[in-house]
Amino acid sequence: MEEKRSSTADTMRTIGALSTVGFSIVLAIVIGAGIGYFLMTQFGLGRWVFFLFFVIGVAAGMVNVYRTAGRILK
C-alpha cells in the first residue's frame, strides 16, 4: 500500500513539472517578443529588433525545457 502511494506521489510531481514546461515556453516567447516590440516602437528601431528578441525568447524557452527535462529524468 505504501509503495502505491509513493508511486502516485512521484507521478503527480512529474505531471506538475511537465505542466510548467508549456507555460515557460509561451512566457519566454511573449516576454522576448514584447521587449522587441517595445524597442521597435519606442525607439524607432527596425523590425530586426523584434525578430531578434523573438528568437532570444524561443531560445530561452528551449533552455527551460532542457533544464526541466534534466530534473525530471534524474
Image (cartoon, rainbow, N blue to C red):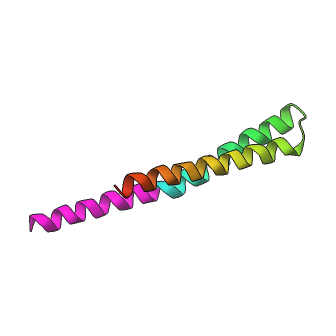
The residues colored magenta run 1-19
Q: Position of residue 29 (x, y in %)?
A: 66, 50
Q: Is residue 6 magenta?
A: yes
- In this rendering, would 60 be left or right of 48? left
Q: Quadrant of residue 45?
A: top right
Q: Position of residue 10 (x, y in %)?
A: 26, 60
Single out the residue that lies furthest toward the left.
1
Q: Quadrant of the N terminus?
A: bottom left
Regarding residue 16, the answer to whether it shows in the image is yes
Q: Position of residue 11 (x, y in %)?
A: 29, 64
Single out the residue that lies furthest toward the top.
43
Q: Of helix, strand and loop, which mostly describes the magenta segment?
A: helix
Point 58% across, 53% down: residue:
62
Point 90% across, 41% down: residue:
46
Q: Is residue 12 magenta?
A: yes
Q: Quadrant of the C terminus?
A: bottom left
- In this rendering, would 18 be left or right of 65? left
Regarding residue 33, the answer to whether it shows in the image is no
Point 54% across, 50% down: residue:
24
**Image vertical order of residue 62 relative to residue 44, above or below:** below
